[in-house]
Image (cartoon, rainbow, N blue to C red):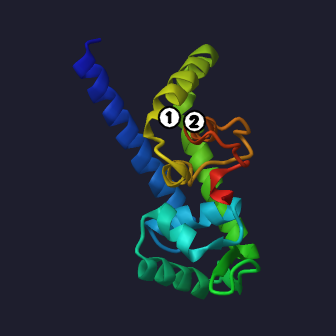
Amino acid sequence: MNEGKIENVLGAFLLALSDSMVRDMESHAPEPGPAVSALALLGDAPGMSIEKLRRILGLSHPGAVRLVDRLSAEGLVRRQPSKNDRRAVEVHLTDVGRKSSAAILCARRRRMAAALQHLEPFERVAFGELTEKMLVQFINGIEDACSIYRLCDHNSCTDCPVNQALFLEEGTPTANTAAER
């Protein structure tokens, strides 16, 4: 297979996978778009500030506030004053929000498993190693790292390649997830 075809087939595969994964995940959120990522992030990093959520999701501050307002109106999140900064508000999932977050991650996992089922076990290992190698090129700091794995199931990936690359770049120890910082 020539380089052009490899790039074209990979691009088509990634687009098809992304579209189907997003569609499946959005069926467990109250609205399409950043609500999916917000619910997944808050499931992994409870108590995230609106400012941090805004930066990771690439939203304006008013956009992030409106998103949290809508999620709160749906009974998925609740705000509470920050223990560390009197000016900040922490966002936490409610019980319903935790169920939605878990369902979003489950939908993502199912879609990924369906895509990988066509590979032999040794091909899955090779594909995983190649994907890790390609993934790290997109990490240019902690906000990139958080954005890249905003939908990851961190319990499945204790030796996160994104955190490892971030450690090498910043030269600082990594937390379980960079979203915790």
**Which amino acid type is marked by label 2?**
Ala
Rendered image quadrant of residue 120: top right
Q: Residue at x 71, y 85 (%)?
A: 80
Measure the C-alpha gap from mark 2 to mark 1.
6 Å
From the image, which quarter does the N terminus lie in?
Answer: top left
Give the mark, 2 or 1, whose residue is nearer the N terminus: 1
Taking the view exactly as shown, the residue that stands out farthest to the front is 171
Taking the view exactly as shown, the residue that stands out farthest to the left is 4
From the image, which quarter does the C terminus lie in?
Answer: bottom right
Measured from the top left, where is residue 58 in percent x and y? 42, 64
Foreground residue, 47 or 7?
47
Measured from the top left, where is residue 77 in percent x and y? 65, 79
Foreground residue, 43 or 80?
80
Q: Residue at x 65, y 63 (%)?
A: 101
Helix, strand or loop at disc 2? Answer: helix
Measured from the top left, where is residue 116 in percent x and y? 55, 30
Q: Are marks 2 and 1 in contact (CB under 8 Å)?
A: yes
Rendered image quadrant of residue 73: bottom right
> Which residue bears the numbered disc 1?
136
Instruction: Decide if residue 14 is on the left or right side of residue 128.
Output: left
